[in-house]
């Protein structure tokens, strides 16, 4: 009899984890809890190798399900159940589980705490935390907001402003100027717009936006040592392509004549006299020309990730990996084990910048696999994931590493590209328009074209549901991950885009208009190796 694994989560990363576990020769069944119905549209789901279990959600029910079905390993893929203590519940019941206990998740949810670790290491974090405190009065919040605004004005470069805590990629703002940053600070501290994500989300985090190469780097910790994956990916957080000023304009102001006029006025761009007489396509062309001619800069909203590629263009530079291990991973793990005395068993995800002077800076540390990074890293991994996870849970990574060739995780020779299919502009039931992810977006749009996907291209489902009439429909902002592989980055990229173009999200309230949106520049790399 083979092993049974339970992956707890419902998004694309969790689906990708389930897909990788079932590839292990040790495993004959993966339960996807609570999962999403997209898995039932895959070959592995239809064959019964991966089974969605939507009725199991409560943590105690997860324990009972594991006992009743002989589950030998649980992987908690997402940040929210980790921070809510699912691992603690499983540990108490003696069920092997990959993921840190609740008290250790503050590494991700409490930036001020992580600041302290980095400062002890001598590493400068690329953020500053402004915390009014959960019980702060209105006047106290205003005072802290003023400190944050003064900091933004003083540092002299563009910033990202985020709410603390676990904002699911929806509480970050890429700001092009102090005014945009100040508005974001007010939304977080004064208006408490993201309070639903927990008390840490009342804090404003200001991060630098400077010229750098972004790297997502992952390690497994077993309570005594760690295993570096040695493979890293390039993630894309901004919602729109760098040159898509029209898309950003519509995102901020909408397509109505009133919105267009307001946007042009606020950005001090002359308003064409015949604006009202133009059709929508003609108006869009005229606006794109005007905005580029005037050099208008608009904030590119932040997301949970619009795409990814692997291997990163720097992965062959051995000095980069060595530098990451020496300057960031080794000292961070040393603090966790030897200063804090933590029995941390799970994944650490370091979001790093390699700056023009080849120095490293840290912009985030997370306690789980990345999304969408895992969707491509998992596909490239040759070493058995179940064996890695089991050794991590059992505290046997040292023994496991001795069995690996050269003591390192193995990888196949292919490149992988993930293009995220998102919900774009669409109409609401009253005829008004939603801006689309990461802003307000509609749901219930019929997904078509999945039967035209090329063999070997993986679809990982995220924000989907089933409708009794329309079948598989959208329910989230990030809906599908279209992941293609090739023997070159260009081959993988071309195949991913060829397939995402076959998919549509049909707006049944608006003559079945396709409201699917995706970025065009995922995995576009300049001759210098810079990601576009």
Image (cartoon, helix red, strand yellow):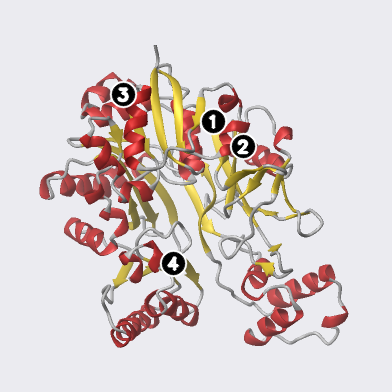
How far across and how far down the image is residue 41, in percent? 63, 32
Label 2 vs label 1: CA separation?
9 Å
- Frontmost of labels 2 and 3 is 2
Q: Which residue is mark 3?
A: 406
Q: CA distance from mark 4 to mark 2?
A: 29 Å
Answer with mark 4 or mark 2, whichever residue precedes in sequence. Answer: 4
- Real-space CA distance between mark 2 and mark 3, rounded to the nearest whole angstrom: 28 Å
Q: Residue at x 68, y 62 (%)?
A: 425
Residue that label 4 marks: 209
- The residue positioned 30% from the left and 86% from the top of the image is 143
Q: Is residue 71 visible?
A: no
Task: Kindly check if marks 2 and 1 are in contact, taking CB atoms under 8 A apart as contact.
Answer: yes
Tell me if residue 133 can be seen.
yes
Residue 507 or residue 459, whichever sits in front = 507
| Of the image marks 2 and 3, the number of the one nearer the N terminus | 3
- Please give the residue where the numbered disc 1 appears in the rendered image: 414
x, y percent for residue 105: 28, 51
Residue shown at the point (63%, 77%) measured from the top left: 296
Q: Secondary structure at mark 4?
A: loop
Residue 492, label in figure: 2
Residue 364 drawn at (x, y percent) = 35, 56
Which quarter of the figure has residue 297? bottom right
Circle 3 packing at 10 Å, graded few (<14), some (14-19), many (20+), is few
Q: Residues within 10 Å of mark 4 (few under 14, many from 20)?
A: some
- Counting residues from the N terminus, which is met first, the one under dot 3 or under dot 1? 3
Which numbered disc, 4 or 3, marks the residue that appears first in the sequence? 4
Q: Quadrant of residue 166?
A: bottom left
């Amino acid at each position: 009899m083979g092993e049974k694994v339970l992956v707890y989560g419902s998004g694309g990363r969790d689906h990708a984890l389930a897909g990788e576990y079932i590839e292990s020769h040790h495993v004959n069944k993966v339960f996807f809890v609570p999962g999403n119905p997209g898995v039932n549209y895959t070959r592995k789901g239809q064959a019964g190798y991966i089974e969605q279990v939507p009725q199991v959600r409560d943590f105690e029910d997860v324990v009972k399900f594991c006992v009743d079905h002989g589950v030998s390993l649980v992987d908690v893929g997402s940040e929210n159940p980790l921070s809510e203590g699912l691992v603690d519940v499983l540990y108490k019941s003696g069920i092997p589980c990959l993921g840190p206990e609740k008290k250790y998740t503050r590494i991700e949810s409490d930036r001020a705490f992580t600041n302290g670790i980095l400062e002890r290491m001598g590493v400068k974090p690329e953020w500053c935390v402004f915390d009014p405190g959960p019980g702060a009065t209105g006047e106290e919040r205003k005072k802290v907001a003023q400190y944050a605004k003064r900091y933004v004005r003083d540092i002299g470069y563009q910033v990202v402003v985020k709410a603390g805590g676990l904002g699911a990629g929806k509480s970050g703002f890429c700001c092009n100027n102090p005014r945009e940053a100040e508005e974001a600070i007010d939304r977080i501290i004064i208006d408490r717009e993201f309070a639903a994500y927990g008390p840490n989300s009342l804090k404003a985090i200001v991060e630098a936006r400077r010229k750098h190469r972004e790297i997502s780097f992952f390690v497994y910790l077993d309570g005594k040592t760690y295993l570096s994956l040695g493979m890293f990916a390039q993630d894309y957080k901004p919602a729109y392509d760098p040159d898509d000023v029209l898309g950003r304009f519509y995102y901020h102001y909408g397509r109505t004549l009133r919105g267009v006029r307001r946007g042009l006025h606020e950005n001090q761009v002359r308003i064409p006299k015949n604006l009202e007489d133009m059709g929508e396509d003609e108006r869009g062309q005229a606006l794109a020309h005007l905005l580029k001619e005037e050099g208008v800069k608009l904030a590119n909203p932040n997301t949970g990730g619009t795409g990814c590629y692997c291997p990163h263009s720097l992965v062959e530079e051995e000095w980069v990996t060595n530098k990451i291990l020496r300057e960031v991973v080794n000292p961070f793990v040393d603090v966790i084990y030897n200063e804090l005395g933590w029995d941390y068993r799970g994944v650490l995800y370091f979001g790093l910048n390699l700056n023009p002077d080849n120095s490293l800076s840290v912009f985030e540390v997370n306690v789980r696999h990345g999304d969408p990074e895992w969707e491509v890293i998992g596909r490239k991994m040759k070493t058995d994931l179940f064996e890695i996870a089991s050794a991590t849970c059992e505290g046997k990574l040292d023994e496991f590493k001795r069995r690996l060739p050269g003591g390192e995780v193995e990888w196949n020779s292919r490149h992988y590209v993930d293009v995220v299919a998102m919900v774009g502009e669409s109409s609401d039931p009253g005829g008004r328009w939603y801006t689309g992810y990461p802003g307000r977006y509609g749901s219930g749009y019929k997904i078509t074209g999945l039967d035209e996907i090329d063999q070997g291209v993986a679809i990982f489902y995220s924000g989907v549901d089933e409708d009794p009439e329309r079948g598989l429909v959208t329910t989230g902002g990030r809906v599908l991950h279209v992941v293609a592989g090739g023997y070159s980055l260009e081959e993988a990229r071309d195949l991913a885009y060829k397939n995402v173009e076959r998919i549509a999200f049909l707006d049944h309230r608006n003559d079945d208009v396709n409201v699917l949106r995706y970025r065009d520049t995922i995995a576009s790399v300049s001759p210098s190796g810079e990601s576009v």
